[in-house]
Amino acid sequence: MKTYSPKAKDVQRKWHVIDADGRILGDVAVQAAALLRGKHKAMFAPSMDTGDYVIVVNAAKVAVTGKKRTEKIYYRHSGYPGGLKAPNFETVMSQDPRKIIEHAVWGMLPKNSIGRAMYRKLRVYTGAEHPHQGQLIRKEGSEL
């Protein structure tokens, strides 16, 4: 029996919408990362990007558990001496709520060129509206 290897022309990409309103940050990120990687498909291969497009809406309404709202820190460094920035969850959420979900999903993707290609298929929006309605239109009876 031969091992199946998916071809690029065989991959069919769909669009999925995840509503983060009141959902736990980790749960949203796990679901988004699995869809981006294509782990829900029978043709999944870790060496190939077989995933779908993911739209996350209501990023500003995502929930966190415990003391993460005040104690979780998002470190980043500019590369220059003294360039360490360490805002907490509330600060990042007030400036740009999309960064919270993007950071969580990025941490769950492979750190290579395939992971970067998967990450480019992620769209995060603060509110409930998104400009991708045209991609979501399907024939009746078909799934999204």
Image (cartoon, rainbow, N blue to C red):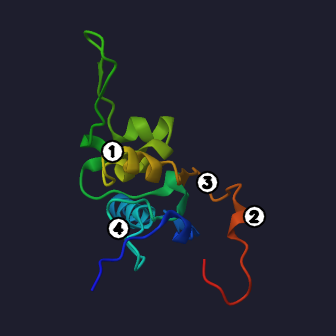
Q: Which kind of residue does numbered mark 3 sit on?
A: Gly
Please state if 133 lies on the left or on the right of 110 as rendered.
right
Q: Residue 38, located in which quarter of the rendered image?
A: bottom left
- Location of residue 66 in the rendering, given as x and y in whole percent from the top left corner: 24, 56
The amino acid beneath tag 1 is: Asn
Q: CA distance from mark 2 to mark 3?
A: 18 Å
Callout in the foreground (2, 3): 2
Q: Residue at x 43, y 47 (%)?
A: 102
Mark closer to the chain start, 3 or 4: 4
Q: How far separated are the C-alphas under marks 3 and 4?
A: 33 Å
Closer-to-camera residue (4/45)? 4
- Residue at horizontal 51 percent and vertical 51 percent from the top: 60
Q: Which residue is mark 2?
A: 134
- The image's mark for residue 127 is 3
Q: Residue furthest top?
A: 81
The quarter of the picture where the N terminus appears is bottom left
Point out the tag, 1 or 4, that comes first from the N-terminus: 4
Specify the label residue 112 is tagged with.
1
Residue assigned mark 4:
45
Labels 2, 1: front one: 1
Q: Is residue 30 above or below residue 77?
A: below
The reply to whether callout 2 and callout 3 are in contact (CB within 8 Å) is: no
Q: Nearer the viewer, mark 3 or mark 1?
A: 1
At horizontal 44% and vertical 67% (from top left) the residue drawn is 35
